[in-house]
Amino acid sequence: MQTTDLVIRKRWGVARASNVFRLLKGLCLSIPALLGMIIAVVMVMGAVFAPLIAPYAPDAIHYQALLSAPNATHWLGTDDLGRDIFSRLLFGARLSLSVGCSAVLLAVVVGVPVGLISGYLGGIADEFMMRVLDSVIALPPLVLALTISAVLGPGLFNATIAIAIVAVPTYARLIRGQVLSVKNNDYVLAARSVGVPAIAILFRHLLPNVMSPIIVQASLGVGFAIILESSLSFIGLGAQPPTATWGSMVQIGFQYLELAPWFVLAPSIAIFLTVLSANLLAEGLRDQVRAQETKGQD
């Protein structure tokens, strides 16, 4: 029996690896998705190796080069304190990307179990959970994030919590819809009939079969989270000086828009490219998931 289980697990692992390989191959064959992957890799590599790539420390002040235009010494110019914008952009990528990914991960960790339980149980429990989520969705995301951040106080940690709370209903409702569509399938009914515990059905049988839309949504969610973090930092509820994030750089640079447009242009382009890559990747993932589902049905 143990040998049979081991063989099944090995075959399942090989099948999963094969699916991942086909997914990556499909993404590489799609020009937009490949472009998104390249941009994402460049952004992540820049953030990871910022201490090696950045020519200056992010807080190093050069009084002789205040608001200096891009030149051979400072590739993207300097800010109002003479700090190198390119260096701050690289170190800011660390925090902006970390906040975006952390907020999405937290939202998935909370939202997916809520959606699983709500969709599987149904009835009054489902109605109650959905009404609570509807009350959260009723407010515009930015307004809700601003409200939560104002209550919790400024700072990147509180901003991450606020962004995650805003995103939880999206993942919960998405996974609930998927569970409702598959919970009466034969493999779920068979598991119930032999007395498999509900928790095992949820996480062993249902979750692996409903995760594809979550992966696609998470790709989109990272870009959305970065926009929210930048918005919170722009109004002073995110990163606090002298911490460098793209949003805080835009907030400071906006004051010198006419005098030094490069100050605000560099972080704005970084935000745009990151959100663009997230959207391109999400579109590519969606196309590949649909193609695999269609092939599976055939």
Image (tube, helix red, strand yellow):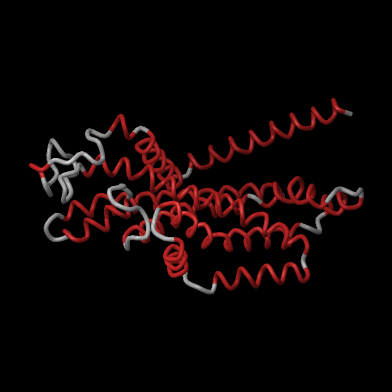
Q: Quadrant of the N terminus?
A: top right
**Residue 154 sits in quarter:** bottom left
Provide residue 250's location: percent of width, then percent of height.
27, 56
For this view, does 4 lie left or right of residue 89? right
Q: Residue furthest left?
A: 64
Q: Residue at x 16, y 58 (%)?
A: 256
Q: Residue at x 69, y 31 (%)?
A: 14
Front residue of 7 and 258:
258
Provide residue 215's location: percent of width, then percent of height.
57, 49
For this view, does 73 lie left or right of residue 154? left
Provide residue 44's location: percent of width, then percent of height.
40, 39
Vertical side of 47 occupied by 132: above or below: below
Tell how many labels.
0
Q: Residue furthest top?
A: 3
Q: Residue at x 11, y 58 (%)?
A: 259
For this view, does 1 lie left or right of residue 72? right
Q: Residue at x 75, y 51 (%)?
A: 202
Front residue of 177 and 82:
82
Front residue of 24 and 89:
89
For this view, does 206 lie left or right of residue 263? right
Vertical side of 153 occupied by 39: above or below: above
**Residue 23 sits in quarter:** top right
Provide residue 178's location: percent of width, then percent of height.
68, 59
